[in-house]
Amino acid sequence: PLNVLHIGFSDYGSIDQSVAVTYIENELANFKSKLSAMNIRMANFFVVKFAFGVNYYNYYSDTGFKEDPISRNMRPTMPQLLEINRLSKNYDLERLPAVGRNAYMFLGREKVIGTAKGKGQDRPQVLYLRCISLSNDITTSTGSERLVSIALDELERAFLDPRVLDSASSRVYLNVLADITQDIDKTVKSFKHIMDSLISKYATKLLKLRVDEIEVKLRVKDESLGYLPIRLIASSSSGGWLTREAYREYLDPITGQTIQYCTMTGDNDICILDPYPTSNILQLKRTTARKVGSTYAPDFLGLLEVSLINSWQTYLDSLGSSQTIPPSLFTFEELVLDRSSNELRPEKRFPGTNKIGMLAWITTMKTPQYPEGREVVIIANDVTVQSGSFGILEDEFFYKASEYARQRGIPRIFLSCNSGARIGLVEELKPKFNIAWKDPTNPFLGFDYLYLSEEDYSTLPAGTVNAIKKVNFNGEVHYVLDAIIGQANGIGVENLRGSGLIAGETSRAYNEVFTLSYVTGRSVGIGAYLNRLGQRVIQMNVGPMILTGYSALNKLLGREVYTSQDQLGGPQIMYNNGVSHEVVPNDGEGMKAVVDWLSYVPKNFNTFTPPILSSDPITRDIDFIPTKAPYDPRHMLGGTLSTDGKSFVSGFFDKNSFKEYLGGWGKSVVVGRARLGGINVGVIAVETRTVEQRIPADPGNPESRETIQLQAGQVWYPDSAYKTAQAINDFNNGENLPLLIFANWRGFSGGTRDMYNEILKFGAMIVDNLRNYKHPVFVYIPPNGELRGGAWVVIDPTINPNKMEMYADKLSRGGILEPPGICEVKYRSQEQKTTMHRTDPVLIELDELLSTNSKDTNNIQSDIQSREKALAPVYLQIAHEFADLHDRAGRMKAKGCISEVLEWKRSREFFYWRILRRLKEDNIKQSISSIYDNKLGNNEITQKFIELFPESLRTHQNDFTLKANKEIVEWLNSNSNAIDSYLSNIKKEFIRQNVLKLIKELTPEEKNELLK
């Protein structure tokens, strides 16, 4: 049928809509045959209610002219424009209220066919938002963002409806009625670019609202073909998260309805126009993952791509660059274990087809640091397979994937969402075993053993159980169970052995490659240990790390003590105790945090991350000045807004480059990563303000109470000393970061509690980790900062003289004790009085009187005492000043304790060139050491390195000034060919000497044979 019948009424009085619907249906039934003869497809009745608008009722021929309640009060063309028929085939639809005039919200519940996936309200749900737009600005970023924002607001309101389940997903459909006068190829490219930007910007909201598809239908003018309908779709239905595709529509020439739409990219067109399908395997897996508070593992790849796009946009915006984001920004191949070779190999396969609960991919990411691309291995629990538990196959796969990253020296990311080691029982024995009761008539007396009958025992495969044959007093044969083994592998202790395997592998990986864990949903037992063994952890708000579930602990305690997993291992525990380095609100932000961290990490274990362009000039002054009064060290590092909030007060590092980690733990020290002129560096600074350490109460102990301990600024406590040592280790292993320590410590806290809490152990760890540091370390005492006693000792450059250097600002101080302390020992009050009598004119005069006048001695002595008492505060200050003069930067430099005295405002430029110089010099020295099989001592390596330079620069080797650093770096940059030639020559000479040495050890006969 093609025709449509429209019948309108001016009003129908106060009749209820449902009554009107029934009345119209009855009347249409009388004219069914005539309507069919007239080829009527739809009868539309509309009633104009003055001051209230228009009511629409639609009756379709394919339903026998019964009213369609879903399209009630829709204009007659609206159901076709919104393609409602594609929804109703597989979903029972229910209209939900929508705010927008041209927006319609439907709650779809899957229709039950045969054995239902769910009953009633528990059936899988999808929220369908269907919209039309009369605007043609969809191809502009502003217009697209406006429409996406409106759509997300509509979905957010719909999710508040109690009829919508927490596990429901959502889809957005937009039919743009205005024609687009733009080339098709340009429209498709524009769509993909705009969608990249919008998905990146709204990733958090899209994840929260569980948007699985955004579909845009529009008509575009083509110069040769005229107006063509196309469909632009970002969908998660075929694997990946909101992957972008473009389709061309083909219409029925008579009805104008869409017959199918076909892909516009690739060689093989794929054509579809099916009803929206019911939950496929991917959708069911997504729902399962969402129920535990996570994202389906393969969808993290899409989130990573979105985060990369966001990273590039931020970087290009900071430079004010018109450069476009590189194509093929993120590519990946799944790693599959080949059982024949027992090795991993890349393979293309559809998501959701894995049989074990562990996945891995080798990815290539194009980042601002590596626009050509860098490889990263990603390992993930699949929480949809046996709750993400670790069985033997999962352990073996994890081990191989981690080994794959180690062998290539590339970063390894672990997406942790699991339930610990897999547990199980031999299920086939449950209906077979019997019980040997002490008294069969009274089971409360207990039993002697469990056994199998002879018949059941004979049916079991050999090795299923260990059993002892026994004949009881009735003559029955019992096979007494001694051990149940089973035929299945992976239900008990063997899984613990596998857990040990991957625990050891992760510990090794931390020392050999960059390791990072992202915790989402939950992480239990060995899953939690793997996160800690990899050291670096990002934790999602809903992602507890626990060893045992709270319900199991309650059973152990015999009462309901704990009410959630978060009490045991949520962010409020793990972030504050230093297990988690960073906490994020959702998985989208989690992947952004992963990409951010990777920006500070080199592409492999043996290199440094190349500097990137920075819009922050290295030659600028530092605006923020550290004061004697307590201040926020983050302002010193990254800058801050002025007190009026109108201008930016710059800090030491490039603007917006400093990122703090481990912020919830050891708060008297601040650690993080930053950039200086585009060079990545690790940062350790000192909190100068008093902070609080909170120790939570344990619900399992009724006597415990939350404890709040105050920690003074500029002091190392057990937690902050451990934090310092941990950060040094992280910067050193896999991140290969030059380290800048802004040293402003007065010492270690040595009270009874802190000594008991192992302050000595953690202070010693700082020394251990600095001694093993393989990259340049720069200790800088900032203005108005001080470095005293044991605090100086644990970061002195003599710990690792080949890598460490120390600098001091001209306004800084360094010494064993602070002036008041040293005056208590070395400049006491008696010596201060001696100084008074030597320098004060009044006392000098009184001393002379006392020596010459023997009659008035008592009065003179009384005057002297009064004068001494009056001068005591002044001369105490003088004593402190005298002691303080011993702690100035000038003395530190004169005694060879520091390399150079710096001025804070200009120190940024100094360290930029110094770090560049050390990185380049160390790289060449490492090449020289490798040529000589790492057998040369440091002095020998340095001597050969100096020989590389012309005479005019050889004197610069012990020159730490800015001028010398710049000259050395510029010479190294402009003489790469000469450097390569020099290294080649010394390698040839080394080989020649070795060959000669070997020849000398040959007998004459062996030499002759060799010459032949």
Image (cartoon, rainbow, N blue to C red):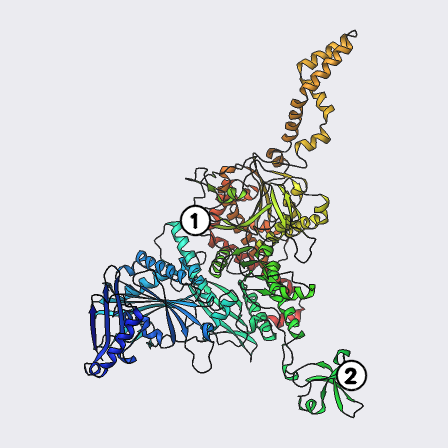
Residue placed furthest toward the right: 473
Residue placed furthest toward the left: 38
Expressed as whole percent of the image width and height from the top left, the position of residue 992 reads: 58, 61
Q: Do labels 1 and 2 touch, CB within 8 Å?
A: no
Kind of element beneath mark 2: loop
Expressed as whole percent of the image width and height from the top left, the position of residue 515 reads: 56, 61
Q: Nearer the viewer, residue 57 or 280?
A: 57
Expressed as whole percent of the image width and height from the top left, the position of residue 311 reads: 43, 56
State the residue position of label 1.
614
How far is disc 1 from disc 2 in space, using C-alphas?
A: 85 Å
Kind of element beneath mark 1: loop
Task: Check disc 2 and give the amino acid type.
Answer: Asp
| Left or right, residue 44 beside residue 841 | left
- Earlier in the chain: of badge 1 and badge 2, it is 2
Mark yes or no: residue 586 visible.
yes
State the residue position of label 2.
439
Quadrant location of the C terminus?
A: bottom right
